[in-house]
Amino acid sequence: MITPIHTILRSVFTLLATFALSFFVGCQSYQLGHPTELPFETIYIQPAKNDSFAPQAQTLVSTQVREAVIRDGRVRLIADQSAADAVLQMTVTDYTRRASARRQDDTEAAQNFDLTLRLQLDLYDQRNDNYFFKGRQVEARTTGYLNNPYAAAGTPDTQGLIQSEYNAMPRLARELGRKAANELLSAW
C-alpha cells in the first residue's frame, strides 16, 4: 500500500527529474562568449570629429568608445593607423536640448531638459580598401536637471544650465561609447 508521503515524494522526484531533463536538453547548444567572428583583428579608432554644438564632446566620446572596445576584448586596439585591419571614423553630428519640465511659477522657464547626442560611425576595411559600413548612427539620451531636488524650498538655483549640461555630458558619452562598441562588434 502506498502511503500519502510516498505519493508526494514520487511527485517531487518526477517534477525534479523533468526539470533537470528540460534544463540539460534546453541548454545543450549554449556556448559561452560571442558567437560572431569579426572580419578584423586589429582596429585603429580615430579621434571623433565634432560637427555639433556640444563643446568638447569629441574628447569624451572618443575616450568612451576606446574603453568600451578594450573592455570587450575581441579586437585589439592599436595606435598605428597604417598597421590596423580596420579604422573607425566617428563624427558627433548633433546635440539637442529640449525642455521636458517647466517651472510651476513660470511656465516659460524650463526646469529639466532632455539632452540627446548623436554619433555617426564609419568602419573602413584597410585590407580591401572599402567600408564595412558607412553612416551608421547611434544616439544617447539623458536628462539635465536645473534645480537641486535636495535643496530646501525657496533656495535659489545655483546649478544652472551650463553646469547641468556639464554634468550630463559624461553620461551621454559613456552611453554613446557602449552603443558604438556594440554596433562595431556585433554581427552586421
Image (tube, rainbow, N blue to C red):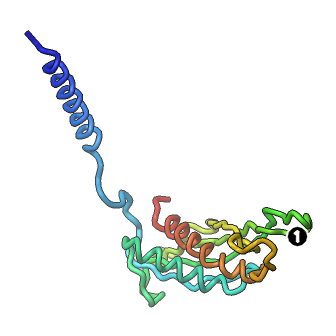
Q: Quadrant of residue 93?
A: bottom right
Q: Return the x and y of residue 12 as percentages of the image width and height.
A: 21, 27
71 with respect to 124 (left or right): left
Q: Quadrant of residue 163?
A: bottom right
Which residue in the rendered view is the most extreme toward the left?
A: 1
Q: Quadrant of residue 115?
A: bottom right
Q: Image quadrant for the N terminus?
A: top left
Could you tell me how many numbered marks the image carries? Answer: 1
Q: Residue at x 29, y 49 (%)?
A: 30
78 with respect to 6 (left or right): right
What residue is pinned by disc 1? Answer: 109
Residue 188 vs residue 118, the one in the foreground: 118
Q: Residue at x 67, y 70 (%)?
A: 118
In the rendered image of this protein, does residue 80 appear above or below residue 2? Answer: below
Q: Residue at x 48, y 87 (%)?
A: 81
Residue 35 vs residue 110, the one in the foreground: 110
In the rendered image of this protein, does residue 91 appear above or below residue 1? Answer: below
Residue 135 vs residue 151, the one in the foreground: 151
Q: Return the x and y of residue 177 as percentages of the image width and height.
A: 54, 73
Which residue in the rendered view is the most extreme toward the bottom?
A: 80
66 with respect to 10 (left or right): right
Give the amino acid type for the residue marked by disc 1 in the picture: Ala
Helix, strand or loop at mark 1:
loop
Q: Residue at x 87, y 63 (%)?
A: 104
Q: Return the x and y of residue 186 as percentages of the image width and height.
A: 46, 62
Which residue in the rendered view is the most extreme toward the top?
A: 1
Residue 110 vs residue 157, the one in the foreground: 157
In the rendered image of this protein, does residue 176 appear above or below residue 62? Answer: above
Q: Mark 1 Cα within 10 Å, few/some/many (few <14, many 20+)?
A: few
